[in-house]
Amino acid sequence: MKYIVTIALLLFSFTSNAGQWTSSQGKDVGIVNPGAFPGKSSFITLIDETFAGCSRNDGAALNESNPNYNEIYSLLLAAKMGEKKVRIYYEGCLLNLPVIKQAYIL
């Protein structure tokens, strides 16, 4: 019985508060605003994409505390300059904006 309870707790702890991906077709990067927040955090938008889960849905925050901040920022900037579509994974809120955790170019 202990094992069943332990497994159930582990499963629920990994699935609760899950983030989400933007459109599977990808979207063009709109605004890349470095330093929009205190520190090195940036404000990012995707054209024709709304982000769910926080009180603001017009963009997302790329937090400087993300260990891949430089890589994600560079990827989004390269996608904007190269007019490539991207997908963004976001989870949680920072200053009422969804927080970017991952991104990739399609």
Image: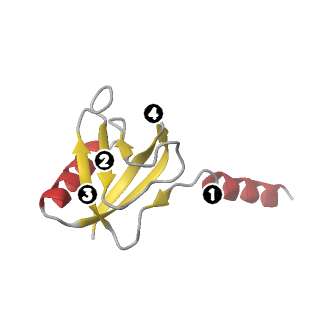
N-terminal of the two: label 2 or label 3? 3
- Mark 1–mark 4 Cα distance, whole angstroms, equals 24 Å
Residue 23: horizontal and vertical position, in percent?
Answer: 41, 67
| Position of residue 87 in the picture relative to residue 76 (left or right) | right
**Is label 1 in a helix, a strand or a loop?**
helix
Specify few, some or many for label 1: CA neighbours under 10 Å numbering under 14, 14-19, or 20 or more: few
Whether residue 82 is situated above or below residue 73 in the rendered picture: below
User: Would you name the residue on which mark 1 appears?
Assistant: 15
Residue contact between numbered discs 3 and 1, judged by CB atoms under 8 Å = no
Furthest residue in direction bottom, as rendered: 25
User: Would you name the residue on which mark 4 appears?
Assistant: 95
Query: Can residue 72 be seen here?
Result: yes
User: Would you name the residue on which mark 3 appears?
Assistant: 29
Residue 89: horizontal and vertical position, in percent?
Answer: 42, 57
N-terminal of the two: label 4 or label 2? 2
N-terminal of the two: label 3 or label 1? 1
**Is label 4 in a helix, a strand or a loop?**
loop
Please state which amino acid type lies under the numbered disc 4: Leu
Residue 83: horizontal and vertical position, in percent?
Answer: 16, 65
N-terminal of the two: label 1 or label 2? 1
- Mark 2–mark 3 Cα distance, whole angstroms, equals 8 Å
Please state which amino acid type lies under the numbered disc 3: Val
Disc number placed over residue 44 in the picture, else none: 2
Please state which amino acid type lies under the numbered disc 1: Thr
Please state which amino acid type lies under the numbered disc 2: Ile
Residue 42: horizontal and vertical position, in percent?
Answer: 29, 39
